[in-house]
Amino acid sequence: MSRKATLTSSSRLYEAIVQKQSYLCVGLDPDASKIPSCFGDGVEALELFCKSIVNATKHVAVAYKPNLAFFETYGAKGWEVLERMIADIPSECLVIADAKRGDIGNTASKYASAIFDGLGADAITVAPYMGEDSVTPFTDRSDKWTILLALTSNPGADDFEFHGNTPLFEKVLSKAQEWGSTDNLMFVVGATRPEMLKKVREIAPDSFLLVPGVGAQGGSLEDVAEFGLNSKCGLLVNSSRGIIYAGGGESTIEEAMSKSRIAAEELASKMAITLQK
């Protein structure tokens, strides 16, 4: 599916951030059990809900991150919803397919083609565990973004990411920069570990970081900004549940989306303050 991509380099992404005075990424994790009943049921509710969220937040969001699992659970119909939704997202917003793909050779190349060409996403999250040949089929696409898992926010991150005399996440950050550039390679760094952002910035001072975990997971935007901002912002801070379910108790779509809009605007206004410091 064709989609005009405009944020194809770090400079263009920074321009969008400056224009909106926001580095907000809205995570689209449409859990059927949490979608307000006013949207209806089934895959139709999924589509209406996601499109309504985009319409309510696109004036302050510079990126959207649909989590593919929440669409794939509906089978082919869910994938079709995802295609239509991505096609409708404004071109001045980055679309990140949160897929966490990780495989080698032709398989990785097919994943890249499916997400970038078939789905029309501008970026994809990728697991680095299998090394260079599992990542370069994505980073070979200079017009797209590869977002590599480096330091995640889940409790299980302690099982591997901090092990070794040189912690694994530091090795990932150092080595992976050989596979792409600051114009097509970002790193995932969880907001629940803001004290580690200083080390991340020492290793990858100029890279963009996708930072999940602000809001419902307990991460602090102020801490992330203090340790993670660079001279070109260098951050996309993701909020999912705190925005998309902000109006969960409302009885109409308009009321629910008003709450989501307010939540997005409040977070973006805090970002604007950090950008001015």
Image: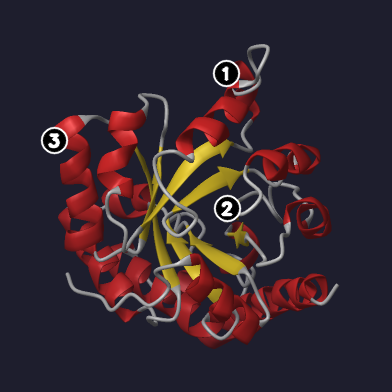
Instruction: Please identify the quarter of the rendering in which residue 14 is found.
Output: bottom right
The image's colouring method is: secondary structure
Residue farthest toward the right in the current orientation of the protein? 277
Query: Disc 1 residue type?
Result: Phe
Query: Disc 1 or 3, which lies upstream in sequence?
Result: 3
- Residue 36 seen anywhere in this rendered image of the structure: no
Where is residue 216 shown, x and y percent of the image?
A: 69, 52
Where is residue 240 shown, x and y percent of the image?
A: 57, 59
Query: Disc 1 or 2, which lies upstream in sequence?
Result: 1
Please count the marks in the image: 3
**Residue 160, numbered label:** 1
Q: Nearer the viewer, residue 178 or 212?
A: 178
Label 1: few (<14), some (14–19) or many (≥20) C-alpha neighbours in 10 Å: few
- Residue that numbered label 2 is attached to: 207
Instruction: Please identify the quarter of the rendering in which residue 265 is found.
Output: bottom right
Query: Disc 3 residue type?
Result: Asn
**Residue 11, numbered label:** none
Query: Disc 2 or 3, which lies upstream in sequence?
Result: 3
Where is residue 231 shown, x and y percent of the image?
A: 71, 65
Residue at position x 52%, y 72% from top? 11
**Residue 106, numbered label:** 3
- Residue 239 seen anywhere in this rendered image of the structure: yes
Residue at position x 54%, y 66% from top? 26
| Whole-number angstrom distance, CA of label 2 to CA of label 3 | 28 Å
